[in-house]
Image: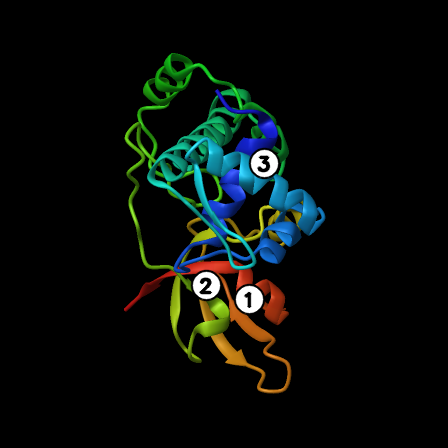
Amino acid sequence: MHSISEENYIKAIYHLQDGQELVSTNEIAGKMNTKASSVTDMLKKLADKNLAEYIPYKGARLTKNGINCATQIIRKHRLWEVFLVEKLDFSWDEVHEIAEQLEHIQSRKLIDEIDKLLDYPKHDPHGDPIPDAQGNYEKTVKTPISQLENGQKGVLSGVLDTSTRFLQYLDKHNIELGTKIQLLEKEAFDGSCLIKTDLKELQISKSIADNLYLKLLK
């Protein structure tokens, strides 16, 4: 059994190391909003438990055990989000922080039963894939609006920012998973985008365009 702090670090490293050989101490400190010295102490603990490989002055990466632990934490988090939305009528902007607390429940049987109750969902309310009991998950190609060419269109299949304020912004403009979006024009000066949904045209900032992921349509 691992502490909540250890699990939070494991999850942070997992997200940061995507495509990288090593994650720097400073990257982890930024993700965890803490000091580099605190990160170093934790990395040594994770290395002692064979959850991470720590190379002083260079960084760290998760071991196979660490990766398995991370995918199970993510599985619990995303299943709880689905449960809160589908069974308790929470909105998608309310569930992230609650799931952050519930993801540390250790009962494997409870999580497996929730998975079964929900009929084994593949994605959470924000479009992120849910790992199965073995840590496997479906990988799909998603493209942020900011990387589209003028005229390209797709279906909203995920959001990078799951904060309450961002999701409420999307709700205000009737944008949700499954919404069809077309890029009409990208502004060369600042990267802002004019997009079109089924309901209206909307000017969005580059930051928003970076956070909306589409499954492209031909």
Closest to the observer: 180 or 35?
Answer: 35
Instruction: Indicate whether 113 appears above or below 214.
Output: above
Residue under numbered circle 1: 209
Q: Amino acid at mark 2?
A: Ile
Q: Amino acid at mark 1?
A: Ala
Colour mode of the rendering: rainbow
Instruction: Indicate whether 84 appears above or below 13.
Output: above
Q: Mark 3 vs mark 1: which is more N-terminal?
A: 3
Judge depth for marks 2 and 1 and give the one in front. 1
Query: Residue at point 53% right, 44% down?
Result: 12
Q: Amino acid at mark 3?
A: His
- The answer to whether residue 163 is visible is no
Query: Residue at point 45% right, 28% down?
Result: 76
Q: Residues within 10 Å of mark 1 (few under 14, many from 20)?
A: many
Horizontal side of residue 158 vs 140, given as left or right = right
Query: Residue at point 49% right, 77% down?
Result: 184
On residue 197, the disc is none
Report x, y in % for residue 213.
Answer: 45, 59
Report x, y in % for residue 92.
Answer: 56, 38
Instruction: Indicate whether 201 appears above or below 2.
Output: below
Q: Residues within 10 Å of mark 3 (few under 14, many from 20)?
A: many
Report x, y in % for residue 17.
Answer: 45, 54
Q: Quadrant of residue 119?
A: top left
Furthest residue to the bottom?
Answer: 188
Q: What secondary structure is marked by label 1?
A: helix
Answer whether labels 3 and 1 touch (C-beta < 8 Å): no
On residue 181, the disc is 2
Closest to the observer: 112 or 187?
Answer: 112
Number of callouts in the render? 3
Residue under numbered circle 3: 96
Report x, y in % for residue 207.
Answer: 62, 66
